[in-house]
Image (tube, grey):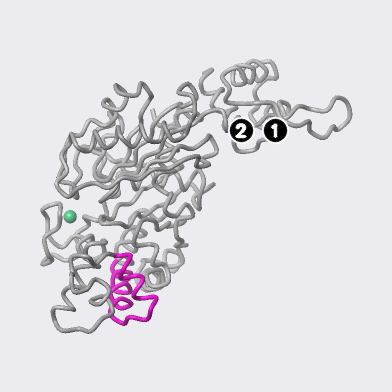
Amino acid sequence: MKTINKSNILNMIRTYGPISRSEIAKKTKLTPPTITNIVSELIESNLVRESEIGISKGGRKPILLTINAEHSFIIGIDVGGHHVRAIMADLNAEIVVQHRTSLPDNLTNDYLLQALIEVVQTIINKANVSKEKIIGIGVGMHGIVNYQEGIAVFAPNFHLSDVPIKSFLEDVFQLPTYVENDARALALGETWFGHGQGIENVVCVNVGIGIGAGIVINNRLFHGQHNIAGEIGHMIVDINGVECSCGSYGCLQTMAGGRSLRDRVIKEISLGRKTLIVNKVKNDLTKITGALIHECAIEGDALSTEVLKEVGSFLGIGVTNLINLINPTKVIIGGGVSKAENYILEPLSAVVKQRALTPKARETEIVLSKLGDNGTVIGAVTLVLQNVFSPNLEK
Ligand SMILES: [Zn+2]
């Protein structure tokens, strides 16, 4: 009971701070002595501090409480398709330092774990923050993640399975570590700091090399029985389609993921289509990236514009299916491909407007991630924050 009261009060201060003890009493219906006791503990553990004096409504001016954001720090890691990105952030998810390292194509479990150690160590060295002030590590990992045990169960784009990220990092750094699928981490980050704030039912689609969705139902991340809920990249949209990294055929990812963008361009070039891209990569088609296609679209290249719009339409199919399945208030699009907003969002929304089930479903709000490139790392930080501020939620 005390833990629940503690996290309630902490959440009140996070959401409404600076706030007085008596305001907390009104909002939580806890007794003043309980609040005084718990607040003292929170101040002692440096999570909360007393700040400016509030406006008096007659009598003594109340002392206001606020989160002691710069006293504690969290390391957030995003394990993406080709890189590991890490940040250190304070309790308000303000980034203090960041670091990024590339991953090779032939990744092994050991290599990935060593890379994680390296980025964490680099971040700690760069930040110049004393070790006691670091309260945890959060990891947003591509693929299927057993979040209870912190194991990357299956990472199809890396061809890795059963990577014990949590136990490994906890052994090395002696810091509590939380691991979650990257799309779910992104969804959590958006509900705390982005466009998902205050929304009970929201879906966040992370479009990179793979496509995953973080589903929040009644304010809680939905995992499903075996942590595969939200894997819309592997929703089969063409029974006669091409092979996917998961081993199946015709998955949405093969038509709307980052790699499909490149494959479409290469196919058209091989059919003799003229495009700016060929000059930009000096005829080396292996150098084509999503970012380059976007750049060429901005410069007016017809093929680039066309493939981005095609991908947008296919994403629209995936999002329409999601809307019909989950019926969220809002859909948030994040990840690499989402950067090409001007080319992708319109065809995506057009498909939803045309094909979702009911008039209300067709009007579902679709927005780009507020956190942008930092979405997954901030989401990873939020994994730790969630355990500090509302430990009763995910256990
Ligand atoms: Zn697949």
Name the quadrant containing residue 228: top left
Q: Which residues are magenta?
A: 290-314
Q: Tag 2, which secondary structure?
A: helix
Assign the C terminus to one quadrant of the image.
Answer: top left
Residue under label 1, please give it.
Answer: 19
Instruction: Please name the residue shown 47% across and 21% down the image.
Output: 132
The residue at label 2 has a CB less than 8 Å from ligand 1: no
Q: Residue 252 placed where, x, y %?
A: 23, 61
Q: Looking at the magenta stretch, what is its main secondary structure? A: helix
In the picture, the disc for residue 12 is: 2
Q: Residue 307 placed where, x, y %?
A: 28, 74
Question: Is residue 300 highlighted in magenta?
Answer: yes
Determine the residue located farthest toward the right in the rendered image: 58
Residue 327 in the figure: left or right of residue 157: right
Q: Tag 1, which secondary structure?
A: strand
Indicate whether 122 appears above or below 157.
above
